[in-house]
Amino acid sequence: MFRPDRIQRCVSSAATSSQLVRRIPLQGNTAALPACSALHGIMDFNVKKLASDAGVFFTRAVQFTEEKLGQAEKTELDPHLENLITRADSTKNWTEKILKQTEVLLQPNPSARIEEFIYDKLDKKLPSRTTNAELLGQYMLEAASDLGAGTPYGSTLIIVGEYQKRLGGAEREFLQTSASTFLTPLRNFLEGDCRTISKERRLLENRRLDLDICKARLKKAKQAEAKAALLSEEVDKAEHELRVAQTEFDRQAEVTRLLLEGISSTHLNHLRCLQDFAEAQATYYAQCHHYMQDLQRELSRCANAVGGSNSTTAVCPKPVSSAFLSGQTSSGEAVSSLSSQNPSALAIQQTQLPVTGTRKAKVLYDYDAHDSSELSLLADELITVYTVPGMDPDWLIGERGNEKGKVPVTYLELLS
């Protein structure tokens, strides 16, 4: 709560302290005279500055209080400037909410978020943290080693554990990309541009209060002059102070306006960041979808292998030959390869039937092949794709020149 009497007591105490310093006896030490004189000068300057600042603050506080009570006139800002201020406030408010909720989405653990915040404030690099999926995958691999990798359960633990580690790696890459392309620009805006705008707006408010104070003084001076109680010099002085205050106010209003108009460019920058964030999400979920499809196929093969064997020590078969999947071997060789791995896998020899019609497709995202049966892709390139009877509907055979391999449908835009 504003207490003018407290300010007056502070100013009086400072003045009393200055007087006490002047009364300190030198006790015959004339060599200390220059130092004491300098100390007196510093004290005088500090006290005068404190008294001046306190007086300005007191006057502004009185003006502000009277405006709130409707007892003083208030200079209204330009409507365009008011709209810019409202827009800046909305931008700051929603940016803070979006940033906070995105941090919760990417890192649900509050303790981990606090740790990241501390490292960020200390300008230190956050140690690499193992994701939950990677940790789960590591536990599964260790369990398989302890329980027996040659058993059906142990071999399945190995397969699932490896895919969990892949999912965790994709998650870590997504978190790093999102932090650099989305979270960091939002934080920089809040900690940089927003703080600068807030500072300039506070200066503008002070200039407005000074302007209104000068207007009130001039009004009182003219009223006193009309009653012949005040000399014309006082009116001239009040008019001069008003002109100076008006100039300072106009200058600060222009500086604030220029900063606020920069919010439009900030919106464009945040738009690009939002697009990058959405693209990172799409890439991450596409990778997860691809990994889970591969895992389901592996588990299906494991189930067929275990179900077709009466031995309790049956293990999951090795992956199907990559040459067979890419169509680079003859049907006889493929059947022979399958027979040597697992008799129950002979059913998939139907994938060697003639292909369907080919189509052109545009690649939406970069894709790195996980084995020799797949084809690596580059965003925006055109490839030829087709399917074969019995093939997983989420995959196609892609061709680019002399290269051929499986490609995920989710990474493609099929062209007519």
Image: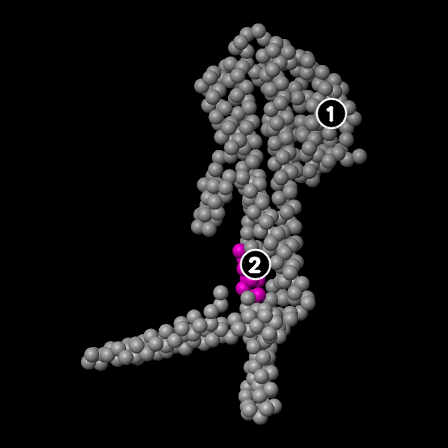
In the rendered image, the vertical position of residue 362 relative to residue 30, given as above or below: above
Does the magenta segment cover residue 196? Answer: yes
The amino acid marked with disc number 1 is Thr
The picture places residue 105, in percent across and down from the top left corner, at: 57, 41
* Left or right for 275, reference 56: right
How many marks the image carries: the answer is 2
Indicate the colouring scheme. one colour
Please name whichever residue, 137 or 393, is drawn nearer the observer in this view of the structure.
137
Query: Which residue is drawn at the image coordinates 55% and 90% (left, top)?
Result: 230
Question: Going 28% across and 77% down the picture, which residue do you hit?
Answer: 35
The residue stretch that appears in magenta: 191-201
Q: Which amino acid does label 2 sit on?
A: Cys
**On the rendered structure, is 199 left or right of 400?**
left
- The residue that disc 2 covers is 194
Disc 1 marks which residue? 387
Dominant SS in magenta? helix
| Image quadrant where residue 50 sits | bottom left
In the image: residue 389, left or right of residue 240:
right
What is the quadrant of residue 103 in the picture? top right
Residue 349 horizontal/vertical position (percent): 69, 15
Q: Does residue 23 appear in this view?
A: yes
Q: Which of the image's four quarters has the C terminus?
A: top right
- Residue 151 in the image: x percent, y percent? 51, 14
Q: Which mark is residue 255?
A: none
Q: Is 283 part of what is drawn in magenta?
A: no
Q: Which of marks 2 and 1 is nearer the N terminus?
A: 2
Label 2 environment density (alpha carbons within 10 Å; few <14, some 14–19, many ≥20)? many
> What residue do we see at 59% from left, 70% from top?
69
Residue 367 visible in the displayed image = no
The alpha-carbon separation of the residues under discs 2 and 1 comes to 54 Å
